Structures are given as C-alpha cells and as structure tokens.
Image: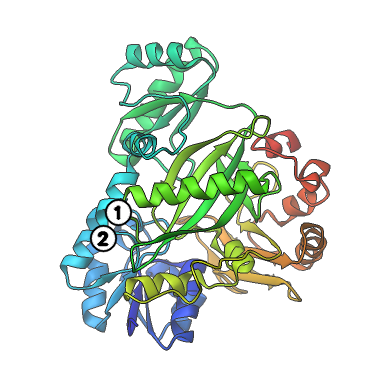
C-alpha cells in the first residue's frame, strides 16, 4: 500500500481523501492556497504546504508548485480529487515521469475520454449507445447548420473539450443555432483553449443517469451501480441518488454492461463514471461523457455498496486487489446526496462570506462531508460547494424522511446557502414520486 499521499485539491474532497488515508495509516499531505490556510483539511493533514496565492492558476493548478511540495515532503503518490488537475492528462504524465504514483486512470485514458467527439466515436465503436450527433467537430457555422438539419431540432451545441455542465447551449431552430454556435465556440476557446464544437440531438424531457465503474489492478472493469443526477441547475448537479427510481432491473443490466464496455474500450484503471442520458418514455439510454476521476457524488455509491471508493482507488494505484469480491457485488438500500452550496436558493447566484453559525445534522443514516466549519470564510475564488449532505436507509421512502429531518437541522448563517431549496425539493410531489427529469428545477422556479 502507498505510504504517503499528497492531496492536490482543497475543501471537502481534500478532507474526505485525508480521512481515508489516515484510517489506512497513510501519511496525508495537504497543499493549500493563502486563502485556504484556516480550512479544516489543512489542520487535519499530517503535513501541509502553502503553494501560492488564492488564484487557482497560481496554486491548485500550479503543477510546478504541487510537484515541488511532493518532493519536499517525500510524498509517494498524488491524489487529484475532482476538478482542478484531476483530468489533466499532461499533469498525470508529469507525475508519473517524476517517479510518483498517480491515483487515477492513466494519461492515455484521460486523453481518450477528454475530447467529447473522440469519446463518442470510441464508445460507438465499442457498442455503447450514443445519441445522434456529429462524428467530427463542426468546423464552421455552415457545417453546424448542415449537421443540425440532418440530426433534427432541437439540438445541443457542446464544447468538445468542455465538462462540468459548462460550454453547452440548446438550439430549437436554425436562428437559435447561429447564436448558440458562436457563443459556445467563443466560451470554449476562452475556457478550454479549444473552440471545437459538436452538435447532438437534444432531448427536452430526459433523465441524467450515470454508472460508477472501477478498473481493477488485475485489468478487470466492474460497475458499482447507477446514480440518478437529474436535479440540476444550469446543467450542474444539485442532488444525486442511488439506485435511480427510473431504472428497472432489466434496464440496469443493460446500462451497467454498457458502462463496463466503455471502460474496457480504453483499458480503464481506477475510479471513473460513465454518464448517460435516459429517455424515460422509451427506456433508451445514450452515452454522454466519461469522467475520468472520482465524482463529487461518490458517497451514495459507497453507502449502497458498502465500500470506501477512495480506499479502492488507493488499492488499485498500489497494485492491490479490491476489498470486495468483484463477482459478488450486491447493492443494498438507498442513498441521496444534496450539494450544500454558498449560493442563494432561488437564483443560485454565489454568496460568499464569513460563516457565523455552522451546525451539521447527525443521526442514523446521516453523513456530512464538509469543507468548512464555523468561523471560516467562504471566498469567491473557488467552487461554491460548502458540504455534501448524504442520507441513507433501507428504502427510498425512509431516506426521504431522514433527509427532511437532516435538512431542517442543518444550520448555516453568514454566506448565502441553498439549504432552503432542499427543504422545498423534499416536499415537491414530482421529486417525491421519483418520476422527475432534468427540467424539475426550472419547473420549481
């Protein structure tokens, strides 16, 4: 097993990884910006290194500073968490070239799945269903118009190098496409340094369902169930649950088998997620993208399968067998995760500030993965995620009741936060029924 681990991230995910590392007797090393010096993850690490000012480009995305910290502390491995450098193939290559262990998929897999067009084509060749769309970037507006006419409106205009719900627009006709194409292309060039755009069929009523996969050290790829991720704002997730209320045993079998094929197609190792769009009326699903890292919502899978995904990541990176029997995976119960963000609960606009009160809920089936505590300052430099409230139980109904109590008990004063939104969601008949889709939040607003 790895003996020392540098966590190249911040906030709740850094704290989460550090917790498992210390449980396993691994020396946990944190890196942090000047803005994060007082956050819990820094205090809880065995060692912490200041790597730069608040600007992420000068700290959490500063590969030279992170590698220097690894060298100075004698770290054996680097875990990137999610976001920042987690899906940066060049960083993964540099880490391994430096003689360090990269806790994640290899750089070739990251590269293969990082470009949405290339990923679509790979998945189609592997027999994974993909939505109707372009197999090459739409080189210019005329090419986009021609492609959309062949696919049929409405269409989704997407940045080929995008992710995290960014770089997407919907066009219901040619006039809208002309506007969205220029907008998405400009955004993609600015944010990702790559203006390539693809055109796909857009499904107005659709569910977002993903499968957790794990590529084992012996070369096998296993699927650890699905997660429902349809409660979203601006194409970004707010709530995830497992299992999905929309997935039947027969559909689950097809969905998980396709996800395993996706992983096998790129020789995948370590944790990853195959994201799909599900048409609830026909039961058809289509590959959306693959996230070559640990997901924010991994705790719901941990509850349902009774495993620690971070531990499994570390075991794969160490060349060790998993803690579970890959041939006897049995899901049990239900779990829901709510992303507690520093944003107002109506328009979801960021609201940083000093946390004057922070009281976390507790009780049976309640877990809070938090990045902050009372007295900390939520700055405008990073993602607005404050904590994840995860609730588990034997049935979905039991989890929903526990979730209501947990949300009511979660007290945060200071920065704006979206806890009131979850209180509203947990009384929404559409959500409670389980028959919701990605438009639920817009219908609530």
The residue singled out by tag 1 in the image is 88
| Front position in the image: 95 or 250 | 250
Residue 182: % across, % down? 38, 21
Q: Residue at x 75, y 38 (%)?
A: 444
Q: Is residue 97 left or right of residue 140?
A: left
Q: CA distance from mark 1 to mark 2?
A: 6 Å
Residue 212: % across, % down? 50, 56
Examine the image and state in which quarter residue 141 appears.
Answer: top left
Q: Is residue 10 left or right of residue 106?
A: right
Examine the image and state in which quarter residue 438 appears.
Answer: top right
Label 1 sits on a secondary structure element that is loop
Q: Is residue 227 left or right of residue 263?
A: right
Mark 1 nearby-residue class (10 Å; few <14, some 14–19, many ≥20): some
The residue singled out by tag 2 in the image is 92
**Does 315 sit above or below residue 64?**
below
Examine the image and state in which quarter residue 147 appears.
Answer: top left
Q: Residue at x 52, y 12 (%)?
A: 173
**Does 170 sit above or below residue 291?**
above
């Amino acid at each position: 097993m790895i003996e020392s681990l540098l966590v190249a991230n911040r906030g709740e995910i850094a704290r989460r990884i550090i917790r498992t590392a210390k449980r396993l007797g691994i020396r946990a090393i944190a890196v942090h910006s000047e803005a994060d010096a007082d956050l819990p993850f820094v205090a809880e690490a065995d060692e912490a290194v200041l790597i730069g000012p608040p600007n992420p480009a000068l700290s959490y995305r500063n590969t030279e500073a992170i590698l220097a910290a690894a060298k100075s502390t004698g770290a054996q491995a680097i875990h990137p968490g999610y976001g920042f450098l987690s899906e940066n193939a060049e960083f993964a290559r540099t880490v391994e070239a430096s003689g360090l262990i990269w806790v994640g998929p290899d750089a070739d897999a990251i590269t293969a799945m990082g470009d949405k067009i290339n990923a679509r084509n790979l998945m189609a060749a592997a027999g994974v269903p993909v939505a109707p769309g372009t197999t090459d970037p739409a080189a210019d507006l005329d090419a986009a118009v021609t492609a959309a006419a062949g696919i049929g409106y409405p269409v989704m205009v997407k940045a080929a190098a995008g992710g995290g719900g960014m770089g997407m627009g919907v066009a219901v006709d040619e006039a809208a496409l002309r506007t969205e194409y220029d907008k998405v292309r400009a955004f993609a060039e600015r944010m990702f340094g790559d203006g390539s755009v693809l055109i796909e069929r857009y499904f107005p009523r659709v569910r977002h369902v993903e499968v957790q996969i794990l590529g084992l050290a012996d070369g096998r790829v296993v699927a650890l169930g699905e997660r429902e991720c349809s409660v979203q704002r601006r194409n970004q997730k707010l709530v995830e649950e497992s299992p999905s209320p929309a997935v039947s045993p027969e559909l689950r079998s097809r969905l998980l088998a396709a996800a395993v094929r996706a992983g096998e197609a790129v020789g995948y190792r370590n944790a990853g997620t195959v994201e799909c769009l599900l048409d609830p009326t026909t039961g058809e699903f289509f590959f959306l993208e693959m996230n070559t890292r640990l997901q924010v919502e991994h705790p719901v899978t941990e509850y349902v399968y009774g495993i620690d995904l971070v531990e499994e990541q570390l075991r794969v990176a160490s060349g060790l067998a998993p803690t579970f029997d890959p041939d006897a995976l049995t899901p049990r119960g239900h779990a829901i995760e709510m992303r507690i963000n520093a944003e107002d609960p109506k328009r979801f606009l960021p609201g940083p500030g000093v946390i004057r009160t922070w009281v976390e809920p507790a009780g049976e089936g309640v877990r809070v993965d938090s990045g902050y505590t009372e007295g900390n300052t939520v700055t405008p430099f990073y993602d607005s995620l404050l904590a994840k409230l995860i609730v588990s139980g034997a049935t979905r109904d039991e989890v929903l009741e526990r979730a209501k109590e947990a949300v009511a008990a979660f007290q945060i004063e200071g920065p704006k936060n979206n806890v009131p939104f979850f209180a509203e969601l947990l009384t929404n008949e559409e959500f409670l029924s389980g028959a919701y889709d990605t438009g639920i939040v817009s219908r609530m607003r």
